[in-house]
Image: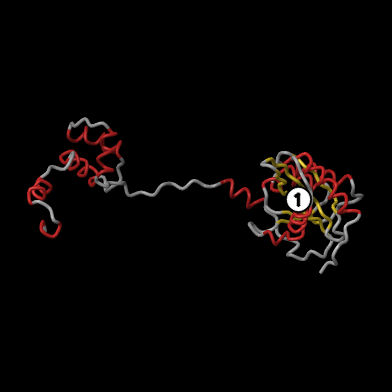
Amino acid sequence: MCEVLELPRSTYNKYVNRRLPDKNDYLLIKAVFEESKRRYGHRRIAMRLKEKYGLVMNHKKVLRIMRHYGLSPDYHKRLKVNYGVRYMKSVVRPNLLERNFNQKAWVTDITYLTFNQKRAYLSTIIDLESRDIIAYKISPQNNLKLVIDTLQDALNKTVDPSGIILHSDQGSQYLAQQYRMMCAAHGIVVSMSRRATPLDNAVIESFHASLKRETLYHHHIKNITEYLTIIHDWLDWYNTTRLRLKKR
């Protein structure tokens, strides 16, 4: 073996005859560990060493030795229930549109507007029948207030919203109790896309993409304030002037 490994015989003998670190302590710890049917952790083993052998050993040393020799209790960690996920599932609403975008409904979403490393957020509600922008709000923060303000603006412009489907993704703002209660109070039926499926809300996804494409190009924008002014002008132009492609 020494010839194969190209090791001096003295090195081999030193390795074979060396004492393993904490060998005696390890044997006692292992005995207590096996006695407990491999259930005790380092603290209980330290207690048992004192009870059975009168040996006072710091529990941190016991832990170090157990880790060094691979002694680990055979038990399963208790899994924590993820109440957040359970709550989210309970408030998610089914996809009532099912990618049929030629029906009476509203669609909504939030997109970010960024320029020179500064960012704002645009929340929009679009009428699927007319493809008009019902309401929009821009805010420096992507929060529940942005969504509530957008919805309130849409309600102020609508005589009777009862029965209208309002479709969104599963963003936290749309899962919030205040948003759901506001919709319910006005008879709005909430619909949601499947998780991580933007095609379920393709109309507004395409709309936001067009907005960014048509506002960022052909303009000599200097700052975020100027960019937001262009956004406001584009949204007004979209509702009043822009030619619409026929819906399919």
Decide which of 114, 86 is in the foreground and name it: 114
Determine crowd level at label 1: few under 14, some 14-19, many 20+ residues with C-alpha closer than 10 A. Answer: some
Q: Is residue 71 left or right of residue 208?
A: left
- At label 1, the amino acid type is Leu
Q: Residue at x 24, y 40 (%)?
A: 65
Q: How is the image coloured?
A: secondary structure
* Residue at (13, 60) in percent of width and height: 4
Q: Answer with the quarter of the image where residue 62 lies.
A: top left
Report the residue marked by disc 1.
216
Coordinates of residue 195 in the picture (x, y in percent): 64, 57
User: At which x and y percent is residue 20?
Assistant: 16, 43
- Where's the C terminus, which quadrant? bottom right
Q: Position of residue 31 (x, y in %)?
A: 20, 44
Q: Position of residue 5 (x, y in %)?
A: 15, 57
Image side of residue 8 versus residue 212, left or right: left
Q: For the N terminus, which image quadrant? A: bottom left
Q: Nearer the viewer, residue 120 or 92?
A: 120
